[in-house]
Amino acid sequence: MYGVLLLLLLFFTNPASPSSFPDRFTKSLSANLLKHKSQEYLELGHPLPFDQLTPSCSHRVLRHSFANTMNSPPFSTGYSPPSDCPSPWSHIGLEFSAKCKGEQYDRIVGLWLGGAELLRTSTAEPTEKGIFWKVRKDITRYSSLLARCRLNLTMMLENVVDHVYTGVYHVEVHFLYYNQNVAVALNPVMRVASIIPYQNLGTVAYEPADLILPISDNGDKGCWFRIERESDFHSKEIRIPRNTRRLVLELYVSFHGNDEFWYSNPPNLYITTNNLATGRGNGAYREVFVTVDGEMVGSEVPFPVVFTGGINPLFWEPVVAIGAFDLPSYDLELTPFLEKLLDGKAHSFGIGVADGISYWLVDANLHIWLDHRSKKVKAKSSVLPLPPAIEVNRGTQFKQLDGVFKIRAERSSEFVGWVKSSSGNYTTTFSQRYNFKSSIRFAKNGTYKLVKQKVKAKREVKVENEKGAVVLRTRVRRRYPINVITATLPGSHKDTYVLVTNMSHSMKEKSLHGDYSSQVYNSQDSRGWMEVKDHSVLSGTANTEQSFRYSGEFGCYSRTVGTSDGNLIRDNSTFRCLSVS
Ligand SMILES: *[C@@H]1O[C@H](CO)[C@@H](O)[C@H](O)[C@H]1NC(C)=O
Ligand SMILES: *[C@@H]1O[C@H](CO)[C@@H](O)[C@H](O)[C@H]1NC(C)=O
Ligand SMILES: *[C@@H]1O[C@H](CO)[C@@H](O)[C@H](O)[C@H]1NC(C)=O
Ligand SMILES: *[C@@H]1O[C@H](CO)[C@@H](O)[C@H](O)[C@H]1NC(C)=O
Ligand SMILES: *[C@@H]1O[C@H](CO)[C@@H](O)[C@H](O)[C@H]1NC(C)=O
């Protein structure tokens, strides 16, 4: 109790503790920041490959209003595939639509079918006149799951509605089923030979898996596992069919609370030495890792998604940050580990967050491809010359509230194994490599903070036949830098403060899958300031520039937008091929 009181006191006497920035905020309605009518929000992305096709059928599979749902179990409804357009389908699209009006924080949302996650999204913060948006996603890779009957479709969206926070999120989800095998490119004029789903960041499967098994929770707090600290390691026992010929683990993650801005967290020594009240510590390195029977099989430094209340909520209207409406999932190739998984026994699949603090929401799906012509497949993992290597170097230097904190980390791993199925004996090599650099600088007695982080990741899957010839190579290279500046100034009232915020981030991805290659360059640059009372934005101004470019097997697409104080002031798009970088 004493601790709580002390914290409260610190909080009220020092509402603008600069060390806890960036932070999350809501847009106060009384500030009359937005005068216009109900507005559509959006995230830039490429059109889906089947956009030009007419679905065979479209079904509303979920409709619910999420009011005061905090601490309630998720919303669940029954799902069975449509009888008017039975499987097989060539493509399946998911359409998540939401609307909201009033004052509200951004909220994290998970959607699961039979416990397997289909979509991780977050909500936009509403306005008095109301906002609405749509998220569209290619969910063809979950076809085998979508063909199953009597599953539960579950959505978790924890929201608080009271006299201050009035926004209720009204959500609908539609599934769109297609069974046209006509290949269509992004550009309606251009046609290509085949369609490959590429939505997911990571190694992409051409053919949807035969079976999808969730590594998720079946509790009443949603199907995700909640990680509060590094030692919160969650695992699930799963039995893999003995005729599995390929195995890919798809990881979903999001970070919240004291780790929502983990990439900007200073080391604990800085916080304790300066007697700061913030819980945002543990340094700025995080790694989500996956284990099988306790052995590490892969890891990910996740892309730093900024939610719509994050850093400066005025940046994210009406165009949200990269990934905020469709958080990336990450694929780890587990085929090299099949040897020990094909014994017909249950094995433990675990997920944890290195250096994580409260809280992370994680789960995963196992995508399993079977050998339909045999009951048992043989596999063997190669003994590795070197275990997965990680090297983290940290530099800490500060005097009172000013200082510099640097981290450099490098990880590389390689796993090899062969699988002999009825189609032959193939050797799969999965290699991963990261390069992580971070620097946090506090100046002006801690009121100025500059955060710079750069992640370079490379992941490759190579499949060779018995003669040693490479039959498939999948390679994804990604770069995702983020820079955030926050500067705290006194406000116009005793209980307010001004926060000057600048940030830029991008996702540059080059991927190769066999003969197909694609490139995405997505970058946002935001500048502005706001006057804040507690966590409510009273006034401010903000501009965001975004440039999105895609080129690949579907042709090209590019879109450039500019927003200023809640208005879309520029929006140009073209299917012409421009240079990507
Ligand atoms: C679906 O959810 C209901 C209620 O949460 C539960 O009783 C039922 O067992 C679930 N069905 C399946 C197939 O998981
Ligand atoms: C620096 O900030 C601390 C805490 O906010 C304050 O107590 C101190 O007086 C400041 N020092 C100067 C030189 O402004
Ligand atoms: C499969 O191929 C690997 C590598 O070429 C070889 O070492 C292994 O013995 C083969 N397995 C079988 C069952 O033939
Ligand atoms: C933010 O960016 C603007 C425009 O480039 C610049 O004038 C300003 O100094 C920056 N603010 C901070 C705190 O660095
Ligand atoms: C971009 O769009 C604006 C209007 O939104 C238009 O005035 C301008 O000419 C366009 N620029 C290009 C290069 O197409």
Image (spheres, grey):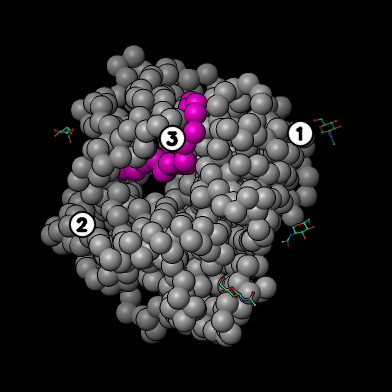
Task: Please give the count of numbered marks on the rendered protein.
Answer: 3
Asked whether 412 or 440 is in front, the reply is: 440
For the question of whether residue 337 can be seen, the reply is: no
Whole-angstrom CA distance, mark 1 to mark 2, is 49 Å
Nearer-N-terminus badge (1/3): 3
Disc 3, disc 2: CB below 8 Å?
no
Instruction: Check residue 569 in the rendering and tell me which mark sits there, or answer none.
Output: 1
Q: Nearer the viewer, mark 1 or mark 3?
A: 3
Does the residue tagged 1 have its C-beta within 8 Å of any atom of ligand 5? yes
Q: Residues within 10 Å of mark 3 (few under 14, many from 20)?
A: few
The residue carrying mark 2 is 236
Of tags 1 and 2, which is closer to the observer? Answer: 1
Task: Work out which residue is located at the far front of the displayed protein and give it.
Answer: 494
The three-letter code of the residue at mark 1 reads Ile
* Amino acid type of the residue tagged 2 in the rendering: Lys
Query: How far apart are labels 3 and 2 at the CA level?
Result: 40 Å
In which quadrant will I find the N terminus?
bottom left
Residue 467 in the image, given as x and y percentages of width and height: 44, 68
Q: Give the magenta part as a residue range.
A: 99-122
For residue 164, which numbered disc appears in the image? 3
Q: Residue furthest left?
A: 345
Q: Are marks 1 and 2 in contact (CB under 8 Å)?
A: no
Q: Is residue 390 above or below residue 17?
A: below
Residue 218: give its label. none
